[in-house]
Image (spheres, coloured by chain):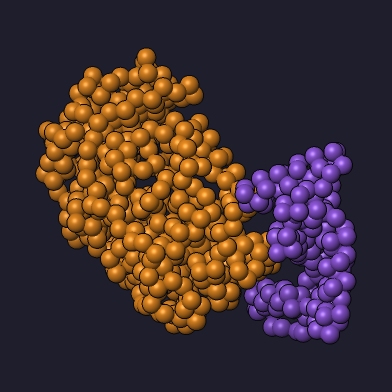
Chain colours: A purple, B orange
Amino acid sequence: MSQPSLVNQVIKRPWLKRWLMPLSNWYTDAAGYRKLGLRADDLIPEESETVLLALKRLPPKEAYDRVFRMRRAFQCSLSHQLLPKNEHTKPEEDYPYLSPIIKEIEAELAEREDLEAMVVKRPARKRPPSMEGLAMTRDVHVAAQTIESE
Amino acid sequence: MLSRSAIGRQAQRALRKQCQQPANRRGLAAPASGSFQYETGTAAGVKFASRDMPGPTTTLALVSRAGTRYEPLPGLTVGLKGFAFKGTERRSALRIQRESELLGSELTSSHSRENLMIGAKFLRDDLPYFVELLAEVASQTRYAPHVYHEEVDAIIKMQQKKFLANVKEMAFNSAHGLAFHRGLGVPLNPSSSLPLSKYLDADTIAEFAASAYAKPSFAVVANGAEHAELSKWVNEFFGDVRSQPASDLKGEQSKYFGGEERIAHGSGNAMVLAFPGSSSFTGGFYKPEISVLAALLGGESTIKWSPGFSLLSQAGAKHPGAKIETKSNIYSDAGLLTVTITGPAKAVGGAAATVVETLQKIASGVSTEEFQKAKALAKFKELENGQNTSAAIELTGAGLVHGDKAYQIDEVAKAVDGVNEDAVKQAAKTILEHKASVSTVGDLFMLPYAQDLGLKV
């Protein structure tokens, strides 16, 4: 459920990062969620199996804080108010607490997909018939490793 | 002695021969091939043993001294067992599973009161892969909280329920609890009334793993692998394993207490009469006469369609429905001789009284023939157990971990050979003089108290 982004490409190029950083800060601030005391990861839509599982895997303290932030933001939204300046989310508090877990789950799912789609190939080489049984399993092992490295 | 119609001439001759001259017989205990013997060694600080049996498959196991006896908090052994072959730093649980499936193998994990075994059975050529896998499980398993909550915890809860429904297991564990209190008395599976969540989570299990999977606490045992090859791979892969345990897993010397416990239960009846037994051969309290006494008491027939020779199976025939089993449970420094009776409440009560009567009879005298049969059976069981791969692996691993000495089955069989009738009589007498551990589970209205049976508790 992680959004597509060019962050990695930008960070690789320091000149571009230096150039885009003020723009990015301005944009994040203008998005307004920090003024409601939220973090960027609170905005990830919950309506998917992956995110629901990730939410279950949150440490208890993180899960509690998340609910607190959301309730506070909801109240602010209902009363058409912003939080006082000192309660705004500070940039250093706005770290990704949920997306690493989501990425982990996505990697697990992708790995499962890969393994499901794996084709075990046997080499065409001819072997003496007595070695047939053992040789076959060795080749399967090798095939598994090649897939691993791909 | 035996009527001709009842038994063939050859069998009569064989029996006579066995009874008359046991000393001349070439004992099973002295196999010419020496295939029972494990070769032992140390590589990268890890003790290992192997025996090269001809055949296309290998059984490999890591035997750790992390049984329920040594767990610092309840349930840790079961928790650690649940984490075996789960995700490691290098690969996920799914990948481990799929890779081992591709190679055609079986991954196992089990525990006993003293040991935790994680192992694999596979084709001989794949030895390096599985040595690496065991080393990875021992040193790089990730004890992640979500794995515990999503996978391990559910299985533990199921095991608790299964344990709660099994009267025999319950009585057996309760008898151990009565006999040894803590240590060996800790139940093999945590019961469901235990507040496990208080003690068990990923962090405590990780801490326990740091002690259980440290070099001095485990041994690697292989059945059907070349010694030199195993040595090479253990040396290569087990280098990263912790060299010192985080905290020592030393258990105290077990002490026998005894007593009685009665637990009401709705589904079935079980009674366990337990008496102090024999420690393992390497332990300080080895008494071979106890295993002969267990075979003499018996209860289960070794042949079909007949109650067999053992005293309890013959006596038990008077109480239809009651199933009697006698076992000499051997641990590293203590033992427990248990007679387990299950069945309908009335039959169990009657059979329990018979057990005590039989013991009293043995204390006053045993017939030579029965004694010889019991001795032969005890020896057979011992050797058969030693030949059985999984039991032999556990015994060998435990022997290495506890005392730098592999379990030498030949010596045990020799010790059983040396038992005489007086020793068995004396053993029965001592048992009756000391306190017994009696555990009763089931319909308590019908089941008798230990005192009614004539046992001291």
Query: Relative to the observer, which residue lies in front, B180 or B347?
Result: B180
Q: Position of residue A96 (x, y in %)?
A: 73, 61
- Residue B43, can we see it? yes
The residue most toward the front is A85
Q: Residue at x 51, y 38 (%)?
A: B160
Name the image quarter holding residue A106: bottom right
| Position of the C terminus of chain B by quadrant | top left
Q: Relative to A131, does residue B192 appear above or below in the rendering?
A: above
Q: Position of residue B376 (x, y in %)?
A: 27, 50
User: In this view of the protein, which residue sits in the foreground, B78 or B9?
Assistant: B78
The residue located at (42%, 45%) in the rendering is B74
> In x, y percent, where is residue B83?
55, 56
> Which quadrant of the structure image shows residue A109?
bottom right
Left or right of A50: which side holds B32?
A: left
- Residue drawn where x is 62% and y is 49% of the image: A61
Residue at 55%, 64% (x, y): give it.
B141
Q: Position of residue B253 (x, y in %)?
A: 23, 52
Quarter holding the N terminus of chain B is top left
